[in-house]
Structure formats: C-alpha cells, structure tokens
Image: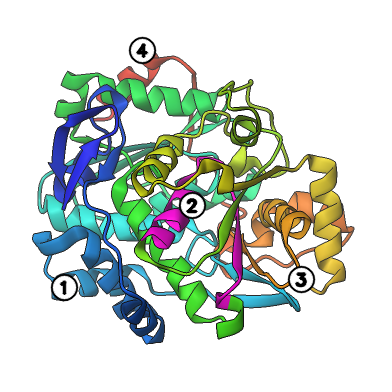
C-alpha cells in the first residue's frame, strides 16, 4: 500500500511507515495512493459475510501484500471482539451503536486495530504514543495499548473540559499509560502534539507515534463498521440510505466517505456538528474561518480546526464528487437537550453526540429515505449531563463502575511545549 503526504505529494510511504510515523513532513496527513473499488457483486458478497472476515477483506484491499490476509484476519479478530448493532429508533431511522467495546465508544475499533498493527510492525522496538483527546480517543487508546510491551503512551487532554467519567476511564490506569491535563482546550492539546512531531530529534529519540484519528490505521478500521451497518439493513433501506455522522475531528466522516468510495451504497452523508461549526459554515459560504473553540454538552466534538478535513477534500477531488452534495448541520446545546428528550420519548436512551447526529438527520431526511445515525458513546459516559437533561438517574455499566472511585493519576501542565518537552524527556 502506497500513501502520499497531502502537503507534499513527493513524500510517499508504505502502510507500515504511515502507521509508524503518524504524520508526514510539515504535519501532512497520509492518504491512500490507490482508491480500491469493489464491484456490485463483490459488495453483495461482502454484505453476506461475518464482521471479522468482511473487515479483513476490506482492509486487505487497502493494505495489499504488506500483511498477509491470514495475519491480517488474526489481528482484526483480536481487535474487533465486540459487536456494532443497528438498533431501530423509528420506522425510517436506526442508530448504529458503536459503544459496545471496552471503553464504550466508537474509538475502540480504531484504537484496538492500531495497537494490533503497531505491535505487528514494530516488533521489539520501543515506541512512544503521544496523542491528544477531546474525550473518547484517550480512553480507547489507553485501553488498547495498556500493558503492551515496549509501548509508552502519553495522552494530553483539556483540563476540566471532558466529562468526569471519561476522565476516570483512562486517567486511572497507570503503568505504561501517562495522562496529562493541559490548561487549555482540545486545539491547544492538538497543537502541542503537532509541535512534538515537528521536533525531529525528540521524535527520533522517543520513537514518537500518534494514535489520533490522523493515524491511517485508525481511519481504515472505521470503514469496517459502515459495512457492518449496511449488512444489517433490509434491501429497501440500503437503496435510499442517508447517514448522519456526529463530527469533531472528522475522522468518522472520512471513513464513511471511504466506505462509499469502495462501493458501499450510501445515498448521502450529513456532517453534524455542535456550535463549533467551522465545516458547516465553510460548506455554506466557501470560507474557511475557524472561531475559538466553545465548550458544549457534546464535548468530544469541541473542535474548531478538524484535522481530517483535508482528507475529506482530497477524497472529493479524487472521486470528482461535489462538496455541495455533502449535507451539514450545526446543533446548539439547547436543541441538543430537547433532542435527547425527544429520543427518550421514542423509547431510545441517547447522549449529546448521537443526539446532534439524530437532529441533523431528522431535519434533513426526505420522504422515502432511510436514516442511520451513529451512536458514538454509551449514554453513561455522559451520566451527569444526561441525568440533568432527563431528570432521571442512569445505571453505570461495569466498565465505568469499576473505575468511578479510583484516583486520577494525571499530571497538570500549561499549554506550553517547553513544559511538555521536559515531561516527555524526564519520564524516558
């Protein structure tokens, strides 16, 4: 598999290099050189397969002969140990629930697959994973790499801007997992990670790698659950399918669009954001003008400079699709609260991120279409806000209950690269 750097097309790397490097020169994202496409017959065959064999075949189409199909399937089986069920919400709408993994969020798919790929590629060579999180990535990465030999994980997150239970899920592990609360927002954390990757001596000394959705292995893993969703739908729903994706860093939407590029029958996608609406405003006006990040109920989407957007634009360019065909919506907190209550009225317990996606879908779905929205996190991960919105208490699932009373093990630092640099070298 060959990939190229979106900021310097002359930099071309293998899949193994892209997984190991994370980012290219000038913080450029890697993008597949070849965009495989399945025939209609192959799509039908894939949709008849079980989740793991199907996922292995999809990933093989991108990775090629760098990893044998047998080893790849073995690694996928080790990563995808939990389901992604489609749950009916109303006659013409369903939710793809992606929160049945160990950290109760969609990022378990990408995090665990990346851990499998990195340990396969690196062997015994020491690696430091440095990543930023707005909530769910941190937990997924921490649990995916926890206890793995020769892997040190350093996770930056915005202090006081993720839910207390999200924080407990990954800041109580210790061992090879180091968590750092940064005095700032997610974009500050992301900027620190980028600075570290721009520091070549530091990068080489620590064997730096990033597990953000910018890493190509995470992105490819996410393609698989879109196929799993469609496989669970009746034929009539597949023919008129509209998918609404709650969007922060835009990795999930990128993966969905890559699934469509492979031939998955999706009529259109909707990019659903909260008031951090850089992309909806851009699609409306053609002007890219990020505002300061605002804290919201759907905090994992509190991103005003989404890292994966260049990949979305590159895919549209390569496929000669029109950006004007991409649906979009921005949903504020008051509407999000109303929507969580509306979903509960339909008999479906949800949380702010999925509520944003459902609202965008509800407002854009046309007669005859079938809507699918992504449920990216278990409602109990946002226990405080969901309980306040609904006025009722939620029971904690075991994965959260067992960590809820453990002490936080995080360091606290300012949004200052010099301080981060010292922390990274001191702990080495």
Of pointers 4 and 3, the one earlier in the residue sequence: 3
Of pointers 3 and 2, the one earlier in the residue sequence: 2
Residue at horizontal 10 percent and vertical 63 percent from the top = 65
Compare residues 169 and 112 and report the one nearer the observer. Answer: 112
Q: CA distance from mark 1 to mark 2?
A: 25 Å
Residue at horizontal 46 percent and vertical 37 percent from the top = 309
Tell me the quarter of the picture where residue 155 sits.
top left
Answer left or right for 293 relative to 348: left
Label 1 with label 2: CB-CB less than 8 Å: no
Residue at horizontal 43 percent and vertical 38 percent from the top = 313
Tell me the quarter of the picture where residue 392 sits.
bottom right
Residue 418: numbered disc: 4
Answer left or right for 62 relative to 357: left
Q: CA distance from mark 1 to mark 3?
A: 39 Å
Dot 2, how many residues are within 10 Å of its Cα: few (below 14), some (14-19), or many (20+)? many
Which residue bears the numbered disc 3? 348
Of pointers 4 and 2, the one earlier in the residue sequence: 2
Q: Nearer the viewer, mark 1 or mark 3?
A: 1
Which residue bears the numbered disc 2? 252
Q: Is residue 412 visible?
A: no
Q: Nearer the viewer, mark 1 or mark 4?
A: 1
Label 4 with label 3: CB-CB less than 8 Å: no
What kind of element bears circle 4?
helix
What kind of element bears circle 1?
helix
Range covered by the magenta-colored residues: 238-261
Residue 79 percent location from the top left of the image = 33, 67
Of pointers 1 and 3, the one earlier in the residue sequence: 1
Residue 69: numbered disc: 1
Residue at horizontal 44 percent and vertical 29 percent from the top = 190
């Amino acid at each position: 598999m060959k990939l190229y750097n979106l900021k310097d097309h002359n930099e071309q790397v293998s899949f193994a290099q892209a997984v190991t490097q994370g980012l290219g020169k000038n913080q450029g994202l890697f993008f597949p050189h070849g965009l495989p496409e399945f025939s209609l017959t192959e799509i039908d065959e894939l949709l008849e397969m079980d989740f793991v064999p199907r996922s292995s075949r999809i990933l093989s189409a991108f990775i090629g002969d760098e990893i044998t199909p047998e080893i790849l399937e073995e690694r996928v089986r080790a990563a995808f140990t939990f389901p992604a069920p489609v749950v009916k919400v109303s006659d013409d709408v369903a939710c793809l629930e992606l929160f049945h993994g160990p950290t109760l969020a969609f990022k378990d798919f990408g995090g665990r697959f990346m851990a499998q790929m990195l340990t396969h590629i690196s062997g015994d060579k020491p690696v430091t994973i440095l990543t930023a999180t707005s909530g769910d990535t941190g937990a997924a990465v921490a649990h995916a790499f926890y206890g793995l030999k020769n892997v040190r994980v350093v996770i930056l997150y915005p202090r006081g801007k993720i839910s207390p239970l999200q924080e407990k899920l990954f800041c109580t592990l210790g061992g090879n997992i180091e968590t750092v609360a940064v005095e700032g927002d997610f974009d500050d954390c992301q900027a620190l990670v980028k600075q570290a990757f721009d520091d070549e001596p530091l990068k080489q000394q620590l064997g730096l790698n990033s597990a953000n959705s910018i890493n190509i292995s995470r992105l490819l893993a996410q393609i698989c659950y879109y196929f799993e969703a469609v496989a669970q739908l009746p034929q009539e729903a597949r023919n008129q399918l509209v998918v609404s994706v709650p969007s922060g860093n835009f990795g999930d939407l990128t993966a969905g669009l890559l699934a469509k590029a492979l031939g998955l029958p999706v009529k259109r996608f909707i990019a659903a954001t909260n008031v951090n609406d850089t992309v909806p405003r851009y699609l409306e006006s053609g002007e890219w003008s990020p505002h300061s990040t605002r804290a919201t109920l759907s905090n994992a989407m509190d991103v005003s400079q989404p890292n994966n957007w260049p990949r979305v634009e590159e895919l549209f360019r390569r496929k000669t699709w029109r950006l004007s065909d991409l649906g979009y919506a921005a949903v504020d907190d008051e509407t999000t609260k109303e929507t969580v209550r509306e979903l509960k009225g339909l008999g479906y317990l949800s949380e702010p991120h999925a509520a944003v996606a459902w609202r965008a879908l509800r407002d854009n779905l046309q007669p005859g279409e079938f809507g699918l929205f992504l449920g990216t996190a278990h409602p109990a991960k946002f226990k405080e806000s969901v309980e306040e919105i609904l006025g009722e208490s939620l029971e904690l699932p075991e994965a959260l209950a067992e960590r809820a009373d453990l002490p936080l093990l995080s360091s606290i630092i300012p949004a200052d690269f010099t301080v981060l640099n010292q922390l990274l070298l001191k702990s080495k």
